[in-house]
Image (cartoon, rainbow, N blue to C red):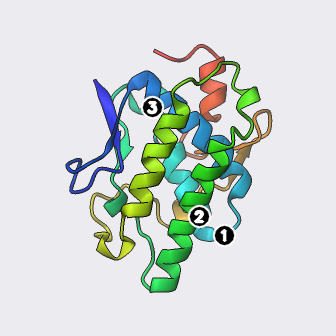
Amino acid sequence: MGNVFGGFGGGGGDGLSLSNGGTDVFLDVLTLAVSDLARDAWDFRFAALLTLQDQNVMGRGAVGFDLEEIDWGTTPAERARAKDFVVRVVDLALRRHRWDELGYEPPFAEGYLRRFRAMVEAFDPADAVRGHGGVFPGPDGAAVASCVPHRVLSALPYWDGCRFCRSAAGQEP
């Protein structure tokens, strides 16, 4: 069992298919990057999307999202800004931003990130189906809470602690 990110058309298309362990690594490195780059309302919504992909809460093999399900905005400028933010998050993660804090070496993370970046680059946000699937948090669901020990955005008030707190507490299945 695994998870798919970025596939087009409800899981179809050319997505990034990851094992459960690969998913954890992919989300760990993206969480470190998005937490340090988020500044605007949309950024915090994207951060919330990532925090809600926690398999320790949602279950193994039960996470993932399609790029077309993201609310990229209504104007060309909004869509371009949102896409640029996602690319910047991936690029920061590709520079191994804060990977020394992981406590493990993520040997395949670079490949996952390069594949996801290529999918985002190829994706036209004008093709997104707004409201499809309901996976992208609305403005009220933005990730604004921060985990103090790990310095990352968390999914409060949905659940206590960040993905690193739950992993460190031995709560991984």
Secondary element under disc 3, as helix, strand or loop, is helix
Residue at 77%, 41% (x, y): give it: 151
Amino acid type indicated by mark 2: Phe
Q: Say the numbered circle drawn on residue 23.
A: 3
Q: Which residue is mark 1?
A: 40
**Disc number lying in front (3 or 1):** 3
**Label 1 secondary element:** loop
Q: Position of residue 47 (x, y in %)?
A: 57, 53
Q: Residues within 10 Å of mark 2 (few under 14, many from 20)?
A: many
Q: Looking at the image, which is closer to me, 85 or 164?
A: 85
Specify the amino acid type for callout 3: Thr
Mark nearest the camera among 1 and 2 is 2
Q: CA distance from mark 1 to mark 2?
A: 10 Å
Q: Compared to 155, does 83 lie above or below? A: below
Q: What is the residue that sits farthest to the right in this orientation?
A: 149
Q: Earlier in the sequence, mark 1 or mark 2?
A: 1
Q: CA distance from mark 3 to mark 1?
A: 26 Å
**Residue at 38% in and 62% down:** 122
Residue 139 visible in the current orientation: no
Mark 1 touches mark 2? (CB < 8 Å): yes
- Which disc number belongs to residue 85? 2
Judging depth in this view, the residue of 160 and 118 nearest the camera is: 118
